[in-house]
Amino acid sequence: MRSSLGRLSACLVMLGCLMGFSAAGAAAGFPAQPITLVVPYPPGGTADSLARVLAKSMGARLGVNMIVLNKGGAGTVVGTQFVANSAADGYTLLFTATPFAINPSLFEKLPYDTLKDFTVVSDIAETPLVVAAGSGTSINTLGELVDRLKTGKDNSYGSAGPGSSPHLVSELLLHEVNGEATHIPYQGSMPAVMDLVANRTTFMFDTPLLMLPLAKEGRLKLLAQTSTQRSPLLPTVPTLQESGYPNLSVTSWFVVAARSGAPRDVLEKLNSAINAALADPVVAGAYEAQGMIKTGGTLDKAQAKLQQEVKNWALAVQVSGAKVR
């Protein structure tokens, strides 16, 4: 009996060693083939351009081709599901954005579990949202906007659509100040901001990339930004936290994620390549041109951030009442 138990124990130890050697061997030989970076958006947008410049620099560091594959549709669900269904080997990655954390609460049912089915390889970049009013209005400060919203008279705001981060942050602001305004969803941010410029709506949240040029032309007034600290892009624009609204501190961001279950050493190698790519002057210049602030960091930091973001956006979705069925 003891002999049998001894043999069983020895076998288990050997099996554990073999598994360890196998994982280490896989990591040592990684990557041995091209890596696919899935972008859950159509070609030509901000996510696509940021992913492509990152992929080129990463590929040079890893010694393989990085293939960017656009799989847009269903509010990023199509591309995200594609990666969720891929092998957990680090060869198929997801370059995604804030909806990654919004969709678990926004969609009544998703074909994947964001926190269980994915591991975030690295934060990539972020940008604050900025709230603005048309230059032809009497609103010059966030305080004056809040006073206007509290009256509940003929207030409205535009966004790129229900469930977008500008929509959800707008609803959080209204909830925080006990204000009223009608949401007007548009087919994209550009028509929404044009109505703001024409003073057809009261206010709007969106990225500095969209808002800042119009403010420099004197067509918009920038009232506040949503990051905890002032962005280098907006050094004279106060944060919502400075203005007394710490619960409204959010950013729009990008991350790279992998199917959960990939070897830790493989993920670490990918994380190192991403951080090195973010330090590349070519990548830095391209991101700065898009109004993005590079972040990067460790695997653990990135995963912890996603968990917190999912919680934060769940509250915003609840307040807004938005739901996709």
Image: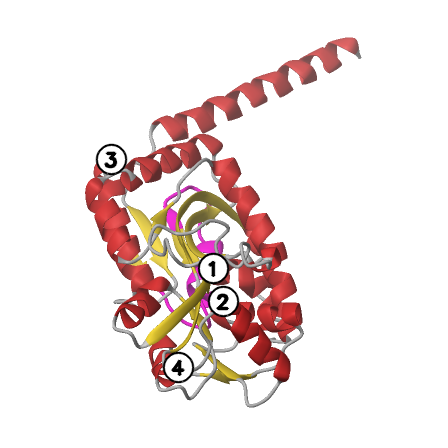
Q: Position of residue 245 (x, y in %)?
A: 59, 59
Q: Residue at x 53, y 43 (%)?
A: 303
Kindly identify the amino acid type of the residue bearing the numbered disc 3: Arg
Left/right of residue 176 with respect to residue 214 in the rendered view: right
The colour scheme applied to this rendered structure is: secondary structure
Alpha carbon distance from label 4 to label 3:
44 Å
Label ID, residue 196: 4
Expressed as whole percent of the image width and height from the top left, the position of residue 235 reads: 37, 53
The magenta region covers: 71-93
Drawn side of residue 189 relative to residue 288, left or right: right
Residue 253 falls inside the magenta stretch: no
Secondary structure category for the residue under label 4: helix
Q: Does the image show residue 70? A: no
Q: Which residue is mark 2?
A: 165
**Residue that label 1 marks:** 98
Q: Which mark is residue 61?
A: 3
The residue mark sitting in front, 2 or 4, is: 4
Q: Which residue does the image show at 46% across and 35% down from the upper left?
A: 298
> As shown in the figure, which amino acid type bears the numbered disc 4?
Leu
Q: Earlier in the sequence, mark 2 or mark 1?
A: 1
**Front residue (pair 231, 298):** 231
**Lower sequence index among marks 4 and 3:** 3
